[in-house]
């Protein structure tokens, strides 16, 4: 027998069967969940769904009760621990089906924090591995932390690391700071964040002066410019691929360039459906009907 309590010859449950259809359905639904989900803590590329991570871990941590090397003590305790959520199975085949059913049901996000399901999952892992030391789950490329988080949920010890320092920060906050400090950490972060925001607004106020209508800009768009070489022009032409700001079906906004020949400058106004707001108020002589500028740039030369 191994130190974990499961004989080396015994196959794990994931090696013989897995409720992939049920787990996939819960994993797909999880993408639309925002409130309380760890994905709202910080965006991360290729974040693994918690549903599939939890289900796969549980299927790998439990032995197959139909295997001839599966300990009888695990079978007895597994039947006992499953009784709060379903009718206790009698045969080994029924026990395997019950474990697969529980894995698929526990993958549901609504059951992730359910006290009964949490206790059943942790008891099954404890029954499989025995002893006072819980099994250790190691993820050297943890990324967003789905696997170590679900390992902790199942009562295991977890070791997580990553080469990316952003991932390490996410892991530290999610796996160490939040469990250690609880909801009070969120209140403290809001307080400190408010102080930083107030200090930043005071320090950067002169760089973001309010518009004449009282609106405060939140960002600036900049572009390199070249002088128009057309006769009697010399206006500065911004080198921009497109003047669109937003192209959503019901929220189309774009910059409309206007060339002021008298001052040899280029002004812009923002236009949308049924409204327009000027960001600069020169006297326009020509205005483009489309968001894209009507100008030509060839061999580092430009002409209106």
Image (cartoon, rainbow, N blue to C red):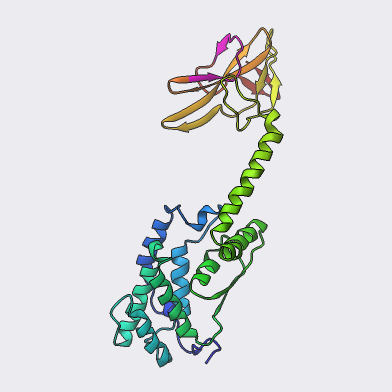
* Displayed quadrant of residue 222: top right
Vertical position of residue 57 compared to residue 251: above or below: below
Q: State the residue in front, 241 or 87.
A: 87
Where residue 51 appears, x then y in whole percent? 43, 64
* Displayed quadrant of residue 72: bottom left
Q: Who's the residue at 60% across and 58% down the image?
A: 170
Where residue 245 appears, x then y in whole percent? 53, 30
Q: State the residue in front, 179 or 59.
A: 179
Where residue 233 appears, x then y in whole percent? 68, 10
Q: Who's the residue at 41% across and 32% down the image?
A: 249
Q: Is residue 158 visible?
A: yes
Bounds of the magenta segment: 276-287
* Residue 4 colored in magenta in the image: no
Where residue 7 appears, x then y in whole percent? 49, 90
Q: Who's the residue at 42% across and 57% down the image?
A: 30
Vertical position of residue 228 compared to residue 42: above or below: above
């Amino acid at each position: 027998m191994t130190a974990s309590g499961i004989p080396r010859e015994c196959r794990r449950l994931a090696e013989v069967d897995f409720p992939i259809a049920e787990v996939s359905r819960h994993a797909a639904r999880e993408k639309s969940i925002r409130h309380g989900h760890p994905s709202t803590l910080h965006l991360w590329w290729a974040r693994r769904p918690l549903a599939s991570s939890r289900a796969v871990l549980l299927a790998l941590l439990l032995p197959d009760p139909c295997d001839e090397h599966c300990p009888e003590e695990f079978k007895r305790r597994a039947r006992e621990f499953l009784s709060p959520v379903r009718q206790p199975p009698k045969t080994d085949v029924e026990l395997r089906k019950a474990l697969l059913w529980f894995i698929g049901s526990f993958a549901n996000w609504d059951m992730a924090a359910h006290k009964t399901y949490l206790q059943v999952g942790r008891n099954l892992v404890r029954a499989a591995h025995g002893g006072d030391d819980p099994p250790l789950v190691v993820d050297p490329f943890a990324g967003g932390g789905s696997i170590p988080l679900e390992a902790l949920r199942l009562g295991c010890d977890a070791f997580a690391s990553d080469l990316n320092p952003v991932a390490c920060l996410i892991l530290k906050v999610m796996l160490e700071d939040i469990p250690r400090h609880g909801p009070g950490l969120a209140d403290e972060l809001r307080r400190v964040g408010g102080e930083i925001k107030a200090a930043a607004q005071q320090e950067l106020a002169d760089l973001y002066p309010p518009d004449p209508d009282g609106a405060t800009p939140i960002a600036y768009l900049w572009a390199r410019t070249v002088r128009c070489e057309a006769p009697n022009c010399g206006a500065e032409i911004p080198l921009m691929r497109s003047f669109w700001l937003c192209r959503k079906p019901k929220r189309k906004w774009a910059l409309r360039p206007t060339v002021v020949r008298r001052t040899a400058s280029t002004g812009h106004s923002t236009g949308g459906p049924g409204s327009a707001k000027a960001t600069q108020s020169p006297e326009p002589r020509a205005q483009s009907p489309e968001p894209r500028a009507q100008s030509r740039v060839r061999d580092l030369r430009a002409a209106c």
